[in-house]
Amino acid sequence: GNVPLTTPRPRVNGQRASLETFEGRLESFRGRQHPIDPERLARAGFYSSGEQDRVLCFKCGGGLKGWRPDEDPWEQHARHYPGCSFLLAEKGGEYVNSMQLRYPKGDH
Ligand SMILES: [Zn+2]
């Protein structure tokens, strides 16, 4: 017998997509109303917490709610959770700094 006995690992195609992926986060908004385009939220690392318009970042765990339609998910992420490693990796420290300047602490 010259047949190798290594069986291919069964592919784990989980029903629930991982929140670390854009698709998984987008999925969390399915069937929900949100003032912000879920695609933009998902891109900025957010997924729906399941309550009202509250979203959470998959990386830093930062939560945001009370969204207005004119708000930008990345901006709000940088404003409230400037230390998030996902944010820093995606947008860079300069962007985060500029948002911190734009929204000085203590104005909310
Ligand atoms: Zn974050």
Image (cartoon, rainbow, N blue to C red):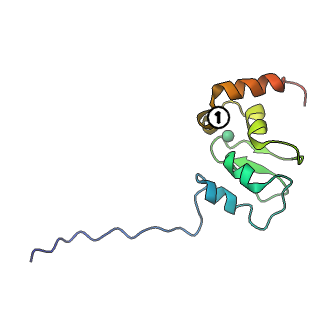
Give how far across and how far down residue 4 sits, in percent.
17, 71
Which residue is the extreme one toward the left? Answer: 1
The crowd level at tag 1 (other Cα within 10 Å; few <14, some 14-19, many 20+) is some
Secondary element under disc 1, as helix, strand or loop, is helix
The quarter of the rendering in which ligand 1 is drawn is top right
Q: Residue at 82% of width from left, 58% of height from top?
A: 51
Point out the image quarter for the N terminus.
bottom left
Q: Amino acid at mark 1?
A: Lys
In the rendered image, is residue 47 in sight?
no
Q: Residue furthest bottom?
A: 1
Q: Residue at x 78, y 68 (%)?
A: 31
Residue at image point 82% right, 52% down: 36
How far across and down, in percent of the image, does residue 108 sit? 90, 31
As displayed, is residue 68 above or below residue 103? below
Task: Name the side, left or right, on which 18 lies relative to 7.
Answer: right
Is residue 21 shown above or below 9?
A: above
- State which quadrant residue 63 falls in: top right
> Where does label 1 land, which residue?
91
Judge whether 104 appears above or below 55 on screen: above
Q: Is mark 1 within 8 Å of ligand 1?
A: no
Can residue 34 be seen here? The reply is yes
Quick check: 89 above or below 58? above
Residue depicted at x 61% and y 39%: 86
Q: How far from the left and from the top, in percent, is residue 103?
A: 84, 27
Count the labels in the image: 1
Of residues 55 and 36, the one nearer the viewer is 36
Seen from the viewer's position, the closer of residues 102 and 77 is 102
